[in-house]
Amino acid sequence: MLRNKDIHDRLKDLDLFLLDQYKAKHGEKKTNWRTYEQEYAIRIKTAMTELEPLIDEAVSTIPAASGPGRPHELTLKQRVLLLLLQRLFGESNRMMASMLMIFSVLTGIDVSYKTVERLYSDEEVDLALYNLHILILKKKGVKDVDACGDGTGYSLTVSRHYASTAQKEKDAAKENSEGDKTAKSESGKKAKKRRPIFSANGISTVKKIFSEKFMRFETTVFEELVKMSDGEIEIKDVKNKRYIVKKTGDYFEIYSVKKGFIYSFKIQDTVSQMYIAGGISRISEKRAFDSSLEMKEEMKKDIEITLRSVSLDRYYSYSSYVDRFDENTTVYVIPKKNSTLNGSWKWKNTVGSFVNDTMSYLEHHYQREHSENGWSVDKRRFGWSIPQRRDDRIDTSDFCTLLLHNLLRLGAT
């Protein structure tokens, strides 16, 4: 009979010798750079060959929009192609418009940087990009897959780097946990716990403070706060500024939303290394995870992809995350050091598999390295920042990265 002590003992074994045994057995894969360059050239050629016919098919089912206002300067096909190329080259909107001006002699396309910017919030383009995603997955034959998932962050400004900032915060948190409240991170700044803008008891007090601070909200926002259960939600004021509301009983805490980064999560096929679904959030990686699962659910009407298994980071080592997948999907996640058997039967079976057949479990779990490799390649290829401000345009930019990643995997063997 499995006990909590068995989990903790196995985790100790993992740290002491099991992980070393696993690494010794599997070794480190070395890249053959000669064949890699040849394969990469084939993938680029395949992507560029397939791109135009795929876009033609993706836009063919979208009726031309008609109504008041000036008609588009570009066809839908041209808009989709221009947006993908802009994300591929990593150029600013102004630089992309300048490049188009240079090549206008050959292409006949000459538009302003504002036209390029508006592509990120064009509803017709969004529909075409979604169709393109479905077509690429079908062409690659992605159906029954063993998947992995992981998240990362993108900077919204060139002055801040996500990985560096995240590491500094981890270092600061670690120093504070060791009992030195005045400890400083390597950046020289004190590690501070994030504080709310204000806290209050009761919704009437919250309304009063909002009024005193000239924070104006629609009536529907207050109705949402009245019905709110314990937890946290995001709200927007009339100027679209975002706030996080945390509620415990009748006690409310109001936080401003950090604008420096967005979180992105992708679900990936470990064999074809194609991204199946993705999501973003300004709040947390967990919200991005939720968004990616919602996208996969919405895709069911257009393509049926069955997840036989999914490998996740230790961050998702909770029964609530494991239960998000259906009963036919095996979840591989390393339990945290304080994990217990409390939870659903699916969680108990997941932990039991880890304890009883650890080596085989690790072989499945470390397939998630494909996710880490995918993020690394994407950031080196398309950049580590997203130069957009509006949520819809940030979402489109992230989705373009997903599409370009998949497009470049079409020719992979």
Image (cartoon, rainbow, N blue to C red):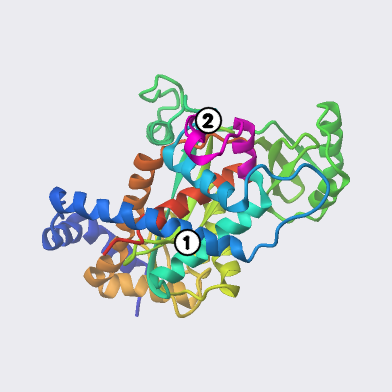
Is-magenta flag for residue 114?
A: yes
Magenta-drawn segment? 97-120
State the separation of the CA atoms marked 2 and 1.
25 Å
Nearest to the observer: residue 266 or residue 397: 397
Picture coordinates of residue 122 (x, y %)?
Answer: 66, 47
Quadrant for residue 382, please give it.
top left
Toward the top, the furthest residue is: 188
Going by the numbered disc 2, the residue's amino acid type is Met
Nearest to the observer: residue 342 or residue 218: 218
Q: Secondary structure at mark 2?
A: helix
Given contact means CB atoms under 8 Å apart, are the residues at marks 2 and 1 in contact?
Answer: no
Is-magenta flag for residue 376?
A: no
Query: Which part of the image, by quadrant, shows the N terminus?
Result: bottom left
Picture coordinates of residue 115 (x, y %)?
Answer: 63, 36
Any part of residue 281 in sight: no
Any part of residue 190 in sight: yes
Nearest to the observer: residue 179 or residue 10: 10
Going by the numbered disc 1, the residue's amino acid type is Pro
Image point (47%, 61%), residue name: 53
**Is the residue 293 above or below the residue 173 in the image?**
below
In the drawing, what numbered circle is on residue 53? Answer: 1
Q: Report the predominant secondary structure element of the magenta stretch.
A: helix
Mark 2 Cα shell of 10 Å, populated few (<14), some (14-19), many (≥20) = some
Q: Secondary structure at mark 1?
A: helix
Picture coordinates of residue 66 (x, y %)?
Answer: 78, 54
**Is the residue 260 above or below the residue 40 in the image?**
above
**Is the residue 61 above or below the residue 396 in the image?**
below
In the drawing, what numbered circle is on residue 101? Answer: 2
Which numbered disc, 2 or 1, marks the residue that appears first in the sequence? 1
Picture coordinates of residue 325 (x, y %)?
Answer: 50, 71
